[in-house]
Image: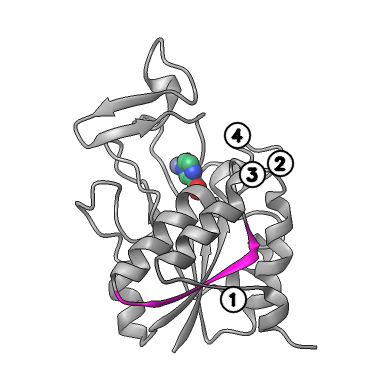
Amino acid sequence: MEALLLIDIQNDFLPGGALPVPQADQVVPVALRLLDRFPLCVASKDWHPREHVSFAANHPGRRVGEVIQTPHGPQVLWPVHCVEGSWGAEFAPGLAEAAGRIDHVVFKGTDAQIDSYSAFFDNGHLRSTGLEDYLRRQGADTLYVLGLATDYCVRWTVEDALKLGFAVWVVQDGCRAVEADKQQQVLQQLQQQGARLTTSQELLPG
Ligand code: VGL
Ligand code: ZN
């Protein structure tokens, strides 16, 4: 069975948010068009406590973009974003209104000590978010993935999904990268790892 997986389409990743991804607002209409085509729709939310390890503000003297070493490995430092319960962590305009069509929301990055780019596991592969169990219980074996950002959370989610044995399609026009010029390179790398690339147009004939 096919499932749609929407990655981190949240206010803070859109223009005007705390960690804006270029043209991220353009993925919302793509997500909305696809919501009705799939029998199962799951969305992830980046959902951090205020004291999260990934926030530069929590490391005096460090700046956004620097990489620090943590007990769980290297960590890129980001602006404070997607704080649990905040406006920035809510679904983007348009998707928020369609939230009734989302069957399940998976929260990630909820542990202050370790980041979670993937919607399946934290960055140390120590703890599962429960997404795999949920998808298997629902009978999903094929995932159509889109969202933000191509070079971080989409990428890590797709790589885990492939390792877990799901068939994975990446909806190219539904993804945007933090570093916009990396988009094509990342999509190619995901393709080399076994993901297939598609577009919303291919999925929605007519
Ligand atoms: C993301 C950086 C930090 C993402 C989340 O959703 O791609 N990137 N947290
Ligand atoms: Zn984050």
User: Three-letter amino acid code at disc 3?
Assistant: Asp
The magenta span reads 165-175
Image coordinates for residue 204, horizontal then vertical, percent: 71, 84
The secondary structure that most of the magenta stretch takes on is strand
User: Three-letter amino acid code at disc 1?
Assistant: Arg
User: Three-letter amino acid code at disc 4?
Assistant: Ala
The residues tagged by marks 2 and 1 sit, at their Cα atoms, a distance apart of 24 Å
Q: Secondary structure at mark 1?
A: helix
Marker disc for residue 15: 2
Q: Secondary structure at mark 4?
A: loop
Q: As rendered, which of 52 and 56 lies closer to the eye?
A: 56
Crowdedness near tag 4: few (<14), some (14–19) or many (≥20) residues, C-alpha within 10 Å? some
> For the N terminus, which image quadrant?
bottom left
Q: Secondary structure at mark 3?
A: helix
Q: Is residue 131 above or below residue 75?
A: below
Name the N-terminal-most of marks 3 and 2.
Answer: 2
Image coordinates for residue 81, horizontal then vertical, percent: 51, 36
Identify the residue shown where x is 37% and y is 18%.
59
Q: Which residue is mark 4?
A: 18
Name the N-terminal-most of marks 3 and 1.
Answer: 1
The residues tagged by marks 3 and 4 sit, at their Cα atoms, a distance apart of 20 Å
Q: Is residue 195 above or below residue 9?
A: below
